[in-house]
Amino acid sequence: MPKVIRMPRNLGTTARGRFIDEIFSYYRAAGRPTLDTISGRIKARDDLAGTASRETIRRVLSEGAVPLSLTTVEAIFVILCELAGREPNEARWDDDGYNNDQKPGWEVLREAWDDAVEEAHEEPPPEPAVAQPQPRVVAEDSDDPWTSDEPPF
């Protein structure tokens, strides 16, 4: 029995999260097909500009990975649309059932992918400053054995 793929939850409201939300909605609409089904259909199509291996599809859907190639995203998207009985360029409906977006599904996904790729290449925030340990100040003429760096034996 194939393992159930669940959408990654740790992406928040980032551009990457928006991209994964979007492509995962097509995965759900397609009835959560197996990775072998998706990759097999991609391999069988010679009209797609890109390709995606089973592992790439798994990483996108379960880990939230963002492919660097738009043709890879397009191949996954077209097959998910095909399995869901949708046209890639049909109008996208929002969660409330209204066509408020007025953009085709492919255009929405492409914009989300582009934002996610840009976000991945932004400079990471600076690391927080870590307090450096201060050297011990030891009086030279102290009789305290604990103030010396020499072992007590």
Image (cartoon, rainbow, N blue to C red):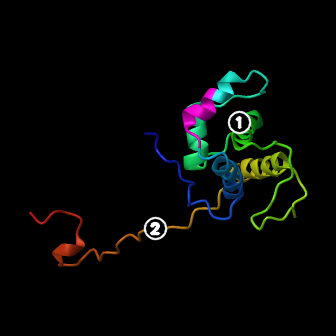
The residue under the point 27% across, 74% down is 140
**Mark 2: secondary structure:** loop
User: In this view of the protein, which residue sits in the foreground, 100 or 115?
Assistant: 100
Amino acid bearing label 2: Gln
Query: Where is 66 relative to 94, above or below?
Result: above
Q: Is residue 80 left or right of residue 33?
A: right
Front disc: 2 or 1: 1
Quarter of the image where the C terminus is located: bottom left
The residue under the point 68% across, 61% down is 14
**36 is within the stretch colored magenta:** yes
Quarter of the image where the N terminus is located: top left
Residues drawn in magenta: 33-40
Q: Is residue 55 visible?
A: no
Mark 2–mark 1 Cα distance, whole angstroms, equals 54 Å
Query: Where is 25 relative to 37, above or below?
Result: below
The residue under the point 73% across, 38% down is 82
Q: Name the residue carrying label 1.
A: 79
Q: Name the residue carrying label 2.
A: 132
Amino acid bearing label 1: Ile
At which x and y percent is residue 18?
71, 57
| Most common secondary structure along the magenta stretch | helix
User: In this view of the protein, which residue sits in the foreground, 130 or 97?
Assistant: 97
The residue under the point 56% across, 67% down is 128
At which x and y percent is residue 144?
18, 78
The answer to which image quadrant residue 9 occupies is bottom right
Outermost residue, left direction? 153
